[in-house]
Amino acid sequence: MSAPAPAGSPTGCPAHAGRLDPADPALHTDDGRAAHAVWRDLRRHAPVERRTTPSGLGYWSLTRYRDCDRVLRDHTAFTSEHGNLLRMLGTDDPAGGKQMAVTDPPRHAAMREPLQRALSMKSVDAHRERIRATVRRVVEPLADGGVFDFGQAMTLLPMAVTGVLMGIPEADWAQLTGFTSACVAPDDPRLMLPAGPTATLETAHRELFAYFQDLAHEREKALGDDLLSFLLTLDLGGRTMSPGEVMSNCYSLLLGANVTTGHVASTVMATQTDTGVFEDWAAHPELTVRATEEALRWASPAGHFLRYATRDVLLRGTRIHRGDALVTWLNSANFDEEVFKDPFVFDIRRRPNRHITFGAGVHFCVGHTVAKVTLRLLFAELLSRFESFEIAGPPRRLYSGFVAGYTHLPITARLRARRGRVGY
């Protein structure tokens, strides 16, 4: 069940103080070896390191699990309200104080707690069969025996699930998937507009916000039991959300789903088809919940989160000053040898498995239950229906400094003579 051990120091990417830049999208376009070599080097020799962006802005790079976990959990010492992604470094996020992801307590709790109840396991479980039907529809072409682009299908899957839960018309799913992809990978040549990455990002943001503004206007005329209707009627201490807050949180929910769920499945498929993992998992479907947690740790699709220190603090003996920016590298923390035994082994029996793929603390991803249920149903469907998978062509990685994943992954699969046990 082992993945290849991290390769030696990679070459061909920009260097900083003798080390490669973990934010460089080019570092994440291979099978993961280059990125993991950088993470391993930083964990060993520079777990708290001062770095400078190409534009001259400085930040602290954190690669050890315990440091990342501490910063993400302590919202009193490390705020998210100025922005939570490295690309926002040096600017104030206009969504600060309006969108849950960039709002700290106590205002954060007023928005999060009702939505968390709406997205609880009990609530999401009520939609289990609807999600299962969506999963089956997305992977159905794989049963034909021909080459199936699993990466492209997994890019569309979370949009289909979230689209159902938010009441988004199916005719709009493909377009919205393209916009969310452009938001996390504006440098990707396949997504970039001729005017460049900044214009690509601004256009995608503008289109998404305009779309949700129009959809909310229509939904107000006929409220339903979907998440958009929930946001429109959410009671925030005697008031409802402003239009800007509704738009911002719709954007956040959609983006969070689309950049996480599908890339987990694609990464596992790309790295585990010939390791025996799927055979073991299919023989023990009762391990699906635990194995899905390992899939989330292994893929770590959201690469980082940004925070700003609200006061002077010490991290591993290094003084971080008030106002300093810190970047927590989740995809390094989830392979930290100090916390995870044999981190480069995909272990479906791993316990404990306290990965921080969804973040930590008050900003733990509010949609994590939807993502987990979708992945459990997906793997249950695949492993009960197919007995083997093969990579059928060169995969293509997303070119992004934030999200690690695949845009294309051609595979073939062999159907089981008899359907296996369904683990979830």
Image (cartoon, rainbow, N blue to C red):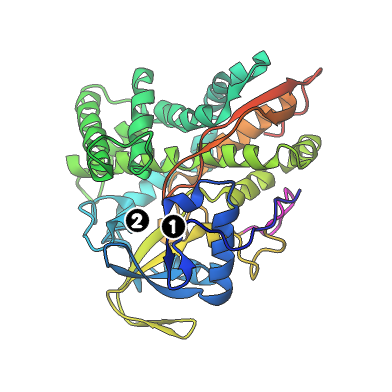
| Quadrant in the rendering for residue 21 | bottom left
Name the spot of residue 285 as percent of width and height, x first: 75, 37
Residue 175 to residue 119: above or below: above
Q: Determine the CA span between mark 1 and mark 2.
A: 7 Å
Task: Tell me the element at label 2.
Answer: loop
The residue at which mark 2 appears reads as 85
Of the two numbered discs 1 and 2 on the same chain, state the one appearing first in sequence: 2
Name the spot of residue 339 as percent of width and height, x first: 64, 67
Q: Which residues are magenta?
A: 344-353
At label 1, the amino acid type is His
The one nearer the camera, 50 or 126, is: 50
The one nearer the camera, 332 or 106, is: 332
Residue 123 to residue 366: above or below: above
Does the residue at mark 1 contact the one at mark 2 (Cβ under 8 Å)? yes
Quadrant of the frame with the C terminus: top right
* Magenta-span inclusion, residue 352: yes
The residue at which mark 1 appears reads as 304
Task: Tell me the element at label 1.
Answer: strand
At label 2, the amino acid type is Leu
Name the spot of residue 74 as percent of width and height, x first: 41, 70
Query: Does the magenta stretch mainly form a helix, a strand or a loop?
Result: loop
* Magenta-span inclusion, residue 267: no
Q: Does residue 208 appear left or right of residue 364 in this picture? A: left
| Quadrant in the rendering for residue 306 | bottom left
